Image (tube, rainbow, N blue to C red):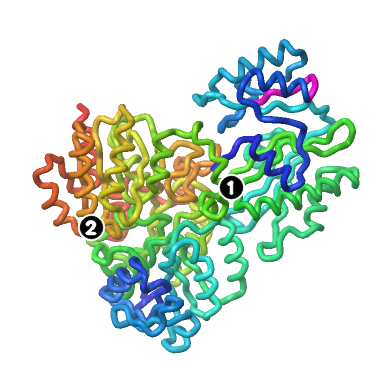
Amino acid sequence: MKVHEYQAKNIFNKYGIPIPEEKMCVSVDEVIAVSGELGLPCVIKAQVHVGGRGKAGGIKVAKTEQEVKEYAKQILSMEIKGLPVRKVLVSEAVSIASEAYLGIINDRTAKKTVMMACKEGGVEIEEVARKKPEAILKVYADSLIGFLPHKARQIGLFLYDDSKTAFVCAKIAEKLYKMFIELDSSLAEINPLVVTDSGELIALDAKINFDDNGLYRHPDIEAMRDRESEDESEQMARESDLSYVKLTGNIGCVVNGAGLAMATMDLVKHFGGEPANFLDIGGSSSPQKVKNALDILLRDKNVKVIFFNIFGGITRCDDVANGILEAKKELKIKQPIVARLTGTNQEKAMEILKEAGLIFAQSMDDGAKKAIQLLK
Amino acid sequence: MSILINKDTRLVVQGITGRDGSFHTRQMIKYGTRVVAGVTPGKGGMEVESVPVFNSVNEAVKKTEANAAVIFVPAKFATSAIYEAIDAGVKLVVCIAEGLPTIELVKITAYLNGKDCRLVGPNSPGIVSAGEAKIGILPGHIFKKGKVGVISRSGTLTYEIVDHITKTGLGQSTCLGIGGDPIIGTKFIDCLELFAKDDDTEAVVIVGEIGGRDEQDTAEYVKKYFKKPVFGFIAGKTAPADKRMGHAGAIISGTSGTAAEKVKVLEACGIKVGETPAEVAQLVKNRLA
């Protein structure tokens, strides 16, 4: 789960990581009032869940009252990569002496938590890792003991020649680690971490992603979810315990299991069709879950054909069949349904569906081809 | 022969009295697995499918000499169930439970360091050594004893590919799902090390997906060290960036971890990659026939 910069900064603040004076605003009037309190110049930053805000014109420095009004209006009415900007962060303009990068993730390969530092700030760290890996210092935490102070100092001394600044940075690194572990983060970045003209260290930008699997033990983090900026169908899916991702094609796919769901989309594409979505109905699927899945799927008006690809294991084909029957009745589904149901209780499923007017497929390949054929 | 499990494996089922635990205990016994014990704290003394239930894994191991554990408890309790199994001294822990926070796997990895115990999963569908034993939830009827090893990050996609392999007339030695989470106990390379020493395995299929770089690392390992033919399938060619595709680990971060990138590295390392599940099975068949 992602949170906005202003939410990440609030968390930083709680953990004692220094941030600029700033406030989140939702209207032009609020921005004007806050800029009055903070003084000019100030920075107005769009709060949206996409990268490249700056390039898209979503970050502006306002030097006069006129500019504050103008930029606030502009940013609050813009869309960045399709997402409407509903909130902005208004921040004091900090005079920057130097910029660095500090980030932390769980390294999948090493199976350890790793802190990364780079003397260049405001960079795309993956880009640096590819082109100039030697510019990044990686320091691994001890998974059972934690992030020891000398390792934090190693980070500070790598970034700053001046030892006083280095040790302030080391404290920030320790706090960042503590936050990362306590809150089940999957990524936390201070990018850039700046030294101001007066020698202070400040987290000028903040990014925190959270491990979805850890959210159950952090209701306060879950409460920060910005439902407005989420795709409504994806939100409905999450609430029904389904995984759904909308794509741009017209063949709606309903599958059990994430790997098979991806392979089904790929197969549709392989035979010349366009998948409308990723949809995993999960393991022990009840008829209700199948119904919810179809409900979500059909909100996408591009869907012209529905392709069920079920390999029963824990999932019972008869449960899926009953779900299809009920959904057909209740949702008045007009689109043709191609069904490939194999595995646990497939005979029962066929019996349930024999009068339902479905097009049956013998295999995944057969199903994908039949779905594509129906569009012609 | 086979890897990891065989007909002599003595299994303890953690969470045996639960809905999934009891159902799959029956299925595992039906397949021929020696399920010697079950554990549900507070339900010691019961029996499920004629299997004695104990209050702790430690007690179960002492009384039944169980040497492998399978975990069917909800995510919230799975972490402690894994530690309990490790401490009881079993050599293999298979975690079917999904939804464990990643940081718990970081800690478990460190805890396992130096101990004679292997974790498979979490979020694993389990392991089948065809004709010998099955641990987990994979449907037994699709397997046939044979010479192809299968390693997969997925569940049902594994069934799909195994089914195709069986339909070509070939069979499997051992097939396992290593789990779709970002950090897992046993990775592709760990399995290949075992398959290398297994005389009955003549070829291996790796079923990967978007996210991370395990498949790439595995391909480089295969090129350098692995002598048997390896085939691959990568799911998620049509997946968009920065969206989690069901599995916690199946996410393209920025531009890294794409299917195209993985296929390219696999092929550069001499691993033939099938475009579809059916095609992978055919590639193996062509090579072994």
Q: Nearer the viewer, mark 2 or mark 1?
A: 1
Quarter of the figure with the C terminus of chain B: bottom left
Q: Which circle marks residue B11 in the picture?
A: none
A74 versus A334 height, above or below? above
Q: For the residues labelled 2 and 1, say whether their Cβ atoms are less than 8 Å apart.
A: no
Q: Which residue is mark 1?
A: A220
User: Of the residues shown, which amino acid type is indicated by label 1?
Assistant: Asp
Write the residue at 60% across / 61% down.
Answer: B106
In the rendered structure, does residue A44 fall within the stretch colored magenta?
A: yes
Residue B19 screen position, x and y as percent: 33, 67
Task: Classify 10 Å Cα crowding around label 1: few (below 14), some (14-19), many (20 and above).
Answer: few
Q: Relative to residue B150, is residue A173 drawn left or right? A: right
**Distance Cα–Cα, label 2 vs label 1:** 42 Å
Q: Is residue A214 left or right of residue B284?
A: right
Horizontal side of A289 relative to B4 (left or right) equals: left
Q: Give residue A369's position: percent from left, percent from top.
A: 22, 38
Q: Which residues are magenta?
A: A38-45
Crowd band around label 2 with a 10 angstrom C-alpha radius: few (<14), some (14–19), many (20+): some
Q: What amino acid is labelled 2 in the image? A: Gly
User: Badge 2 sits on which subunit?
Assistant: A
Q: Quadrant of residue A326?
A: top left
**The furthest residue to the top:** A66
User: Looking at the picture, does residue B95 appear above or below residue B132?
Assistant: above
The answer to whether residue A136 shows anywhere in this view is: no
Tell me, for residue A343, which label it has, or none.
2
Front position in the image: B66 or B278: B66
Q: Please state the horizontal and vertical placement of residue A73, each as a whole percent of the image.
A: 62, 15
- Is residue A358 magenta-colored? no
Across and down, in percent, residue B72 comes to 41, 67
